[in-house]
Image (spheres, rainbow, N blue to C red):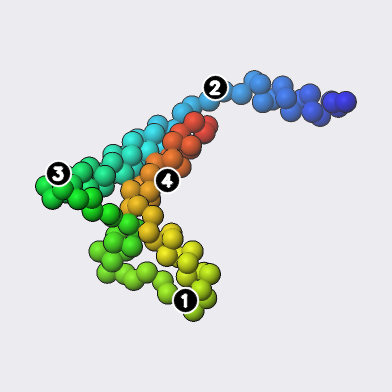
Amino acid sequence: MANLEDDEFLRYLSSGSPRVEDRSAFWMGVAFTVFALCFPTYQAVLWLQAGHWTPLPISYGIQFLGWHVPVTDWAGAQKIINWLFELPLWSIPAFMAFGCFSAWKETI
């Protein structure tokens, strides 16, 4: 059963100000979505020019920045690292857009 303190807390929550959307999270999500769509668009242009699909894994983006894919002596860990870095490059901004759109409906 609810006690007096719970009732007071529920009354406090119900009498609060109306919730406000975080619009900056929405616009960041839109920007990340547009950025994520640039990669398959670039791949489609290359496909139209050459006639074969050019993969763009995360490892290409890492190498473009001058970094290297991590290497370890552990065989299982290396398989996981290789799998992660062979995911499509567009997946990074797509996951960031998902996070922004998830935060969009949170209240301030």
Which residue is disc 4 drawn over?
Answer: 95
Label whose residue precedes the other's in the sequence (2 or 3): 2
- Pair 2/3: label in front: 3
> Circle 2 sits in a helix, a strand or a loop, which is it?
loop
Q: Is residue 70 above or below residue 6?
A: below
The disc, 1 or 4, on the residue closer to the chain's N-terminal end is 1
Please give the label number shown on residue 18.
2
Give the numbered dot on residue 72: 1
Identify which amino acid the numbered label 3 is placed on: Leu
Residue that mark 3 sits on? 48
Q: Is residue 81 above or below residue 35?
A: below
Q: Against 40, is 7 above or below? A: above
Secondary structure under badge 1?
loop
- Tell us which disc is closer to us: 1 or 2: 1
| Residue 56 % position (x, y) | 28, 55
Query: Which image quarter is the N terminus in?
Result: top right
Q: Are marks 1 and 4 in contact (CB under 8 Å)?
A: no
Query: What residue is rendered at 29% in x and 61% in y?
Result: 60
